[in-house]
Amino acid sequence: MDLKEKKSLIEAMLFVSGEPVTLASLKGVLDIPEADLKQGVEELIAEYRERDRGLLILEIAQGFQMVTNPLYAKILRKFTNTATSNKLSMPALETLAIVAYKQPLIKPEIEQIRGVNSDGVIKSLLDKRLIRIVGQKEAPGKPLLYGTTKEFLQYFGLKDLTELPTLKELTREEAA
C-alpha cells in the first residue's frame, strides 16, 4: 500500500468517525507502522490547511478529528438550524474553569471559590459530559472529586490540558 492510499484510508476513517481518533486505533485497523500513520496524518493536516477550504483536520483530545472550518461556523449553524443551546452559561463556564485548573476537587471547594451553591451547574456539566466524577476524597463523608473529560477537550478544541492558558497569561490579558 503506497502513501497516497494510506492517507486516503486515514482520511476516510477520520471522516466517518465524528470524534477524535487516536493513532493506536488507526494502527489497530490498518496494521500500518505508527511512524507511517503519524506521517500520513501530519501530511493530511498540512494539505487541509493549505487548501483553505471548509474542512480541517485537527489534533484534539489526544487524537485527530476532521472538523469544519471555524470561519464558517455562523453560516453552518444557520444552515443546520442549530440553536445556540450548546453555549455554556457564565456560571457553567466559571465552574468549568475552576474544575479545569484545580482538578481534582470537591463540590465545596468549587462553591468556596465561586461563593455560591453549584449543585445545578455541576449537574448540567455532568449531563453535558464536560466534567466527570474521578474518585472520592479521603475525608469524612468521602465527597466526590470532579475533573474534566475528553469531551471537555473536544468542546474547546484542545489537544490536552497543557494547552489551557496559564493563570499568568490570563491575568496579563486582563491587564491589557
Image: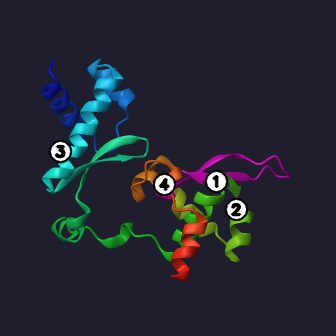
Which amino acid, mark 1? Tyr
Q: Residue at x 75, y 53 (%)?
A: 143
- Vertical position of residue 110 compared to residue 147: above or below: below
In the image, taking residue 21 as reference, residue 142 lies left or right, namely right
Mark 3 crowdedness (10 Å alpha carbons): few <14, some 14-19, many ≥20? few
Label 1's element? strand
Amino acid type at mark 2: Lys
Q: Quadrant of the N terminus?
A: top left
| Stretch of the chain drawn in magenta | 127-148
Which mark lies nearer to you, 3 or 2? 3
**Residue nearest the viewer, comparing 64 with 125:** 64
Q: Quadrant of residue 63?
A: top left
Which residue position is annotated with label 2?
A: 107
C-alpha span from label 3 to label 2: 45 Å
Q: What residue would you read off at disc 3?
A: 47
Of labels 3 and 1, earlier in sequence is 3
Q: Residues within 10 Å of mark 2 (few under 14, many from 20)?
A: some
SS at mark 4? helix
User: Marks 3/1: CA distance?
Assistant: 39 Å
Pick the front one: 163 or 74: 163
Residue occupied by mark 4? 163
